[in-house]
Image: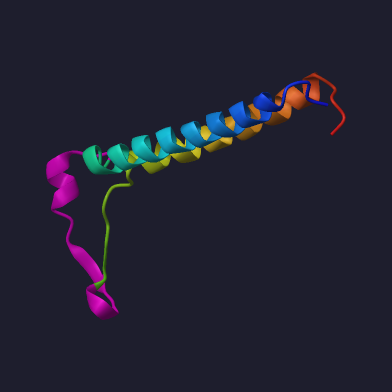
């Protein structure tokens, strides 16, 4: 039971702010650090396969921001499981 109704609002506001911060960092990460390799290699990727509507597939480097997001998600999941496992909380 919550003793203060304002606490619910504060939690929602904090979650919204965290979401906005994530969106800003993700956008900046995709815009400024587009690839994990060198920039000259990243921007000179040749198309290997062409699809309809001008979509092309190439063998380029993997974007660094996506690699960091995947690694962070995996680490969060592992530590989340370990935290609740060691704290013996019944879910």
Foreground: 11 or 41? 11
Residue at image location 29% in from the left, 43% down from the top: 30
Residue at the outermost front position: 5
* 24 on left or right of 14: left
Q: Residue at x 22, y 38 (%)?
A: 32
Q: Is residue 11 above or below residue 86?
A: below
For the C terminus, the quadrant is: top right
Magenta span has 75?
Answer: no
Residue 30 versus residue 13: which sits nearer the camera? Answer: 13
Query: Measured along the vertical axis of the image, is residue 5 above or below residue 34?
Result: above
Give the residue displayed 48% in from the left and 37% down from the top: 19
Quadrant for residue 57, please give it.
bottom left
* Most foreground residue, 25 or 38: 25
Residue 62 appears at what percent x and percent y? 33, 47
Q: Residue furthest right?
A: 90
Quick one: which residue is furthest to the bottom in this view? 52
Q: What are the residue bounds of the magenta stretch?
A: 36-54
- Count of numbered marks: 0
Which quarter of the image is occupied by the N terminus? top right
User: Is residue 38 covered in magenta?
Assistant: yes
**Residue 24's image quarter?**
top left
Picture coordinates of residue 18, whole percent (x, y): 49, 32
Q: Is residue 81 left or right of residue 51?
A: right
Looking at the image, which residue is at 87% across and 30% down? 90
63 vs 79: above or below: below
The color scheme shown is: rainbow
Going by the image, does 12 lie left or right of 16?
right
Q: Position of residue 41 (x, y in %)?
A: 16, 46
**Position of 58 compared to 8: left or right?**
left
Q: Measured from the top left, where is residue 8 in percent x and y?
A: 67, 30
């Amino acid at each position: 039971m919550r003793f203060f109704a304002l606490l619910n609002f504060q939690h929602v506001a904090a979650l919204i702010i965290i979401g906005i911060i994530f969106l800003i960092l993700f956008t900046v990460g995709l815009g400024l650090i587009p690839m994990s390799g060198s920039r000259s290699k990243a921007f000179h990727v040749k198309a290997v396969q062409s699809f309809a509507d001008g979509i092309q597939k190439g063998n380029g480097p993997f974007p660094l921001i996506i690699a960091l997001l995947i690694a962070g998600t995996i680490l969060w999941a592992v530590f989340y499981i370990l935290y609740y496992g060691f704290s013996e909380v019944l879910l």
